[in-house]
Amino acid sequence: MKRYDNFTEDRIAVVDIVQTAAQSDQSQSSDMDVEQGFSNPLASQELQAHHSQILEDHSAPLSAVNGHRPSNGTSNKVKTDNLEFDQIEVSLVDDAGAGVPDEVLVNASDFFLEHNDNYNLTWREASHQISEVAEDPSRPPIPGWNVPYCRWRLRRVIESLFFRVLTLLLIVIDIIIVILDLASGKDFDEVSTYQIIDLIFTIYFVVEIFLRLIALTQPVFFATWYNVVDFAVVLITLVIVIVGMTHNTWAERLSLLTLLRLVRIFRLIRLYTEKQQIETAARQMVSQNKRRYQQNGFDLDLTYVTARVIATSFPSSGLWAWYRNPISRVSKFLNIQHPDRYKIYNLCSEKTYDTEYFQHRVERFMIDDHNVPSLQQMLDFAQSAKSWLNANPENVIVVHCKGGKGRTGTMICVWLVEAGIFTSANQSLEYFGQRRTDMNVSKKFQGVETPSQSRYVGYYEVMKNHLGGQVPLSSPLLLKKIVIRGMMYVGEGNGDDFFFKVDQGNGKELYSAHIGFRRNCHVSYNPERDILEITTVNSPKLDGDVRVLFQTNSKTVPKGYENCPFYFWFNTAFVADTSRKLILTREQLDNPHKPKTWHCFRETFQIEVFFAEGT
């Protein structure tokens, strides 16, 4: 890969807090990777014992599940909230100890996909698994003065919504000019102003057609009927315009000019063909900078996360197909590229489609947009994917939600952990985001959407590595108090304009309270310390997956997903036994995690939730 050509003498240093045990090559683990059959050294009993020892070290890094350090105590009981994840730091350094450019670090995940031969990787299971997809068909070209990148950049321009709308506008103006020219009744020996303008427009259309031909390449361009029609209409129009301005006597004697002028109306068909181009531009705009599959005549919002795991947006019909993947094209792609070897997972609770397009090989998991799957859904998905991929080495899974990012990324990261490709939730989340993002378009991260979704991938890591792949035992809790810090700049500043509810999704509301009206709660606010304390009345009993959602009447507080200021998901089994407390910083709350809200939710904004045992 070109961007690494200058670093062939570099080396990768993989620093793992369990490195000593990992290097002992514990090959006795029975947890074999599903896609390649490689063992996961981090799953061995020796490493688990070493991991337990780490939990007693108070200098352990922050937990990806709860966002706070483990509490004191030497209990041998394995409790999910106290389990810390193995932290693997990847650094690229040369022999002199100098760092490498940011470009290399930003594309760290791409590094694991390619050029592994020049480096000494101790992270065997991950590097080998990902290297099998070095030839990623959805991978964007390498930036620089090379033909693939220049062609890709040209295609981005001519398929942009601005360019297509401009072309449509010029087509409409050109048709109006033709009609005015025909209605003017000018003699054949007189070149009208309309004809000159028509010639200018026609030259633009010729240039546009040939630029499109260069960008798409000849096989792709002529594979679609509307491109063929465009090509024919533009060339015929050019001939007509030139002949109409030459005053050839033979043409006049045969009365061809009158016929040719009338034929110019034939360009009306371009109004319809341009609609196809605008739909392509709209899909490109909606997909933003997610990697797209643009080969073999296809242009789909679709990414190969691994050679056997595909992420895509919703296969759409009707109005949705104007700006999302048309279901007919997705069906054609899968039936050509992976005939009889694919299975689709629909993660949308809000919408479905005719599964006959995919030979009814569709399994549905009902997950609300911008929310999380249940622990049981994650386990069911992992087992279903394992069963399908184990059935045949050529089988692939296709995972989608609406945009192919949040819910899709959550479940795919669950699978990456389950398969042993990554042992860390954080690594799988980072890898998916890098894989789904086209850095050539923009730097916007196209990974898992919300902190709650990332938190649940962390939960799955614990279930996989420490709970035998099982859902934790029931852990009912009573919600006693919520403490919010940093409310000073949020709405009225004291919480009186806020109310909240506790539910389990799908309309299963368990509790609600209004802070301003003091309904179902006692409230106190300390302006000096900027701390709002909400003590619940008629405390609800919570068990399993729980969502707390805050709403406000204030017009100044930004609202995001779920049309609310902030919310968060957690599972009661992952709340610490000792402290009975869940702490979430601004970056760990859904909606305030976005920098565009930080004018309201300042750095000190934080929520602490206090519980009591519910049994």
Image (cartoon, grey):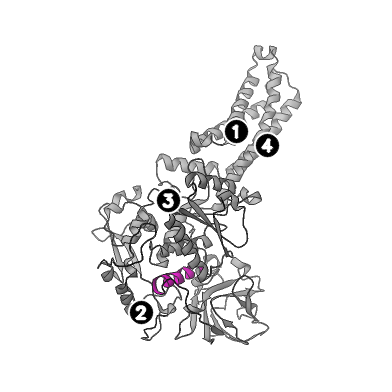
Q: Element under label 2? A: helix
Q: Is residue 164 placed above or below 101 in the rendered structure?
A: above
**Mark closer to the chain start, 4 or 2:** 2
**Mark closer to the chain start, 4 or 1:** 4
The residue labelled by disc 3 is: 394
Q: Residue at x 44, y 86 (%)?
A: 578
Whole-Å distance between the Cαs marked 4 and 2?
Answer: 70 Å
* Mark toward the viewer: 4 or 1: 1
**Dots 1, 2 in contact, CB < 8 A:** no
Whole-Å distance between the Cαs marked 1 and 3?
Answer: 39 Å
Task: Please tell me the numbered disc located at residue 172.
Answer: 4
Which residues lie in the magenta part? 452-470
**Mark closer to the chain start, 2 or 3:** 2
Counting every numbered tag in the picture gives 4
Whole-Å distance between the Cαs marked 2 and 3?
Answer: 41 Å
Quarter holding residue 170 = top right
Q: Element under label 3? A: loop
Disc 3 residue type (three-letter): Glu
